Amino acid sequence: DQHGARSQRSQEADKPHRRKGEKTYSCDDCGKEFTVKAELNRHQVIHTGERPFSCDLCGKSFSWERSLQQHQLIHSGVKAYSCDQCGRAFTQNGHLQNHLVSHSGIKAYS
């Protein structure tokens, strides 16, 4: 069947790309797969609740070092991402992107 074959190819295309025979590491808690064991280990802290990175200024703790670094921008006052339309500034690009919707005229929950 012509459509069945295309559907099967589409399903194959949706799978993460791996080299033939490449080993994967699977999370026992949720089944998510990784090709690098270190990435699996990094992921697993979401299940253990471990938060080894803490802010010296306020004590808030984080699972990942990058999250701590983002948090520390709050204390430094550095707001590297600013809106070209109104000048409002943000510590993270994602926060700026969320803000930009306010200038689009599109209401998120209407």
Image: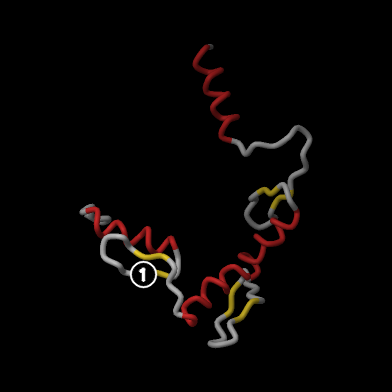
32 or 21, which lies in front? 21
The colour scheme is secondary structure
* Quarter of the view holding residue 51: bottom right
Q: Is residue 47 left or right of residue 76?
A: right
Q: Residues within 10 Å of mark 1 (few under 14, many from 20)?
A: some
Residue drawn at (70%, 56%) of the image:
40
Dot 1 amino acid type: Ala
Q: Is residue 24 above or below residue 108?
A: above
Residue drawn at (56%, 34%) of the image:
14
Q: Is residue 96 left or right of residue 18?
A: left
Q: How many marks?
A: 1
Q: Which residue is mark 1?
A: 89
Rendering coords of residue 28 (x, y %)? 70, 55
Rendering coords of residue 100 (x, y %)? 31, 58
Q: Is residue 68 left or right of residue 107?
A: right
Q: Quadrant of the C terminus?
A: bottom left
Q: Secondary structure at mark 1?
A: strand
Rendering coords of residue 66 (x, y %)? 59, 68
Q: Is residue 82 left or right of residue 17?
A: left
* Quarter of the view holding residue 21: top right
Query: What residue occupies the far top of the structure in this picture?
Result: 1
Rendering coords of residue 24 (x, y %)? 74, 45
Residue drawn at (23%, 55%) of the image:
107
